Amino acid sequence: MNRSQSKYPSVAMMTGVSRAFDDARFTRTVLNNIDFTANAGDLVAITGPSGSGKSTFLHLLGGIDVPDHGHIAVNGMDLTSLNETGRTLFRRKHIGLVFQFFNLIPTLNVIENLRLPLELCSIRSDDSTILALLERFGLEHQAHAYPDLLSGGEQQRVAVIRATIHKPLLILADEPTGNLDDCQSRAVLDLIRQISNDGTCVIMATHSQSASEYADRHCTIKNGKLHEASQA
């Protein structure tokens, strides 16, 4: 079922969004008058050629960047009405980010890496709660390991859990399997699928056809426009 047509509430919305960048000789329009809506529980794959605007799309939804025109709302909050500090605080509490590179803090073990976003959001949590989450996703045996002792797939799974541990409304994943082999990729995508099934909205930019097949919805960015594949 396409959850965009279901009872699930809207989490992310773009209305008439455009974004252009000035190069040395000309202005390059990356996104041109984009409309987009995603709901709680949606897993949306965003595809397109390199440079098409996939990362820009995610950065705008995450409040990392701002559009030249249009409005962006997450859970009803108009991000375009906030200044940079306001967007940062909102993102910290309500949005989770997953990148191609794992970005775990090397001097912290797994539990400490997962505790950090909770502390930034002033959420009190004991280690038993974190351990229960690691156990659910099959990583409890690595709870006290440091990132350099984890495989690439394990590091990315920890990064995905870190992005979700404060229970954000929206997860933005930028090429989350780009540095992984097929087996590691499947483990990460299975985890992302579980998180979406729990009701979190996940929007994933990817070059991978196999990754996009995990999604409920598949959108392509081409020539500044967003095209959504019809649902079966």
Image (cartoon, grey):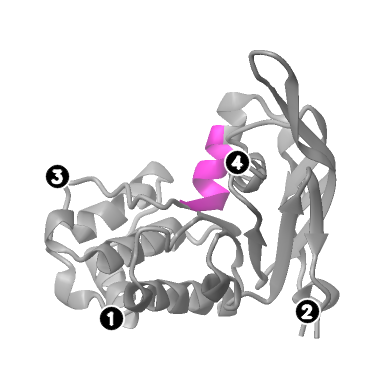
* Spatial CA span between label 1 and label 2: 29 Å
* Image depth: mark 1 or mark 4 in front: 4
Q: CA distance from mark 2 to mark 3?
A: 42 Å
Considering the whole magenta stretch, tell me its main secondary structure. helix
Earlier residue among tags 2 and 4: 2
Q: Which residue is mark 2?
A: 2
Relative placement, left or right, of 16 versus 61 is: right
Mark sitting earlier along the chain (3/4): 4
Could you say where residue 98 lies in the image, as x and y percent from the top left? Answer: 45, 54
Sooner in the amino-acid sequence: mark 2 or mark 3: 2
Please state the horizontal and vertical placement of residue 114, each as a whole percent of the image: 30, 57
Identify which residue, 137 or 229, lies in the foreground.
229
Label drawn at residue 59: 4
Number of on-image labels: 4
Mark 3 near mark 4, Cβ–Cβ under 8 Å? no
Q: Dot 1 lies on which element?
A: loop
Please provide the residue range marked out in magenta.
88-97
Mark 3 lies on residue: 107
Residue 214 in the image, given as x and y percentages of width and height:
57, 78
Q: CA distance from mark 1 to mark 4?
A: 30 Å
Which amino acid does the dot numbered 4 rest on? His
Cα separation between marks 3 and 4: 27 Å
Q: Which residue is mark 1?
A: 138
Q: Report the amino acid beneath label 3.
A: Thr
Circle 3 residues within 10 Å: few <14, some 14–19, many ≥20 = few
- State yes or no: discs 2 and 3 in contact (Cβ < 8 Å): no
Asked if residue 174 is positioned above or below residue 91 in the image, the reply reads: below
